[in-house]
Amino acid sequence: MEFLTDYGLFLAKTLTIVIALVAAVAATMAVVSRQKQDARDALKIRKINDKYEDMAYTLKQEILDKNALKQLSREYKARRKKKPGTEQRERVYVLNFEGDIKASAVSSLREEITAILTVARPGDAVFLRLQSGGGMVHSYGLAASQLMRIREKNIPLTIAVDKIAASGGYMMACVADRILAAPFAILGSIGVVAQIPNFNRLLKKHDIDLELITAGEYKRTLTLFGENTDKARRKFSEDIADTHELFKQFIMDNRPVVDIEKVATGEHWFGTRARDLKLVDELKTSDDWLLEQSKDKDLYEITYRGRRPLMARLFSGMESLMERTAWWDKGNMQRFM
């Protein structure tokens, strides 16, 4: 009896080890497979009309009687058999931009826009769902410039803000021919901000000297560890003010209907108030707009996913955390919109 008990325990331990090894191998294979997928460039296209049609069909299956359901099924199958391109309807290319402080999504946005510009026909349009609270000036300047490429090709551009397009996010939005916003979406914040801690007094307290050598009168203004002077503060304030003026001019050039002096105070407004200030054209969610357009246009959602280096994939979580806390980069103060 004791032998059977010992043998049973031995089998249980062996089975546990085997299961653990199989799970480890499976997890490793899954990680490798995902890394291979992440390493490839990929342009994905999804027809949104099919999504809406599938949703309606699923719902009607539950609420229609038997005869109506048969008729619906025949019509549904007939539509599915039609070859793509047999109906020459206008197309709307749908893009999504979810911005972080570095506007990292611009790397995908530029490729998506390039793809669209290679196939767009007269009558086609672009629709962008935008969500961003702003970030680095140069990063969002590039993002806005990418959207300008659409305007320069005379392709109508509509931008919808369901949650937020503030500061650099609004710099992108103002490029659109038409801006939609949900009633409580946040818009505006047309201003520039920069901040930096200074540890000079702490270093002096501990008798630590700092040697800062520059060539050029304003190569460095405010610093982390050096002693900041009134002259440096004035120069940095001038740079901030100049950036703000450029921001205001960009909005006036692309959305002249706004009273720029009234809205460029750094304040933000909800959608309803933003409409009164002409920051947006219409109160409407992206879902409503797309559903309306799907009745007589073909909607294609374009998503680009580029290659990511192995180390970037491994440390993506740490990189995201650093982005949220980074205020200093390569010795230069970053200005944020």
Image (cartoon, rainbow, N blue to C red):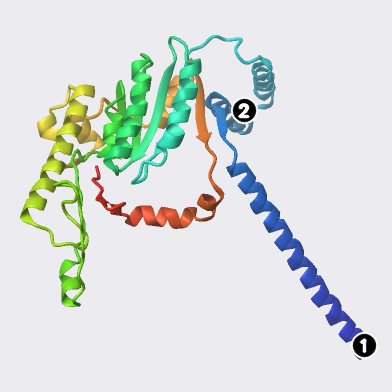
Going from N to C along the chain, the mark reached first, 1 or 2, is: 1
For residue 143, side relative to residue 66 (left or right):
left
- Out of 23 and 322, give the one closest to the viewer: 322
The one nearer the camera, 272 or 299, is 299
Instruction: Mark 1: give few (<14), some (14-19) or many (20+) Cα within 10 Å.
Output: few
Q: Which amino acid, by three-letter code, is at mark 1? A: Phe
The answer to which image quadrant residue 200 occupies is bottom left
Q: Position of residue 86 (x, y in %)?
A: 61, 10
Query: On the image, which quarter does residue 275 sit in?
Result: top left
Of residue 241 and residue 61, the one placed in the foreground of this image is 241
Residue marked by disc 2: 64
Residue visible at 31% across and 28% down? 180
Quadrant assignment for the C terminus: top left
**In the figure, is residue 111 to the left or right of 212?**
right
Residue 246, placed above or below residue 101: above
State the residue in front, 157 or 211: 211
Secondary structure at numbered mark 2: loop
Q: Is residue 115 visible?
A: yes
Identify whether 131 is placed above or below 282: below
Label drawn at residue 3: 1
Which residue is drawn at the image coordinates 60% and 12% (left, top)? 85
Q: Residue at 36% x, 22% y: name it.
A: 149
Quick check: can you spot residue 157? no
Q: What's under tag 2, amino acid-wise?
A: Leu
> Is 322 placed left or right of 239 in the picture?
right
Q: Position of residue 12 (x, y in %)?
A: 82, 76
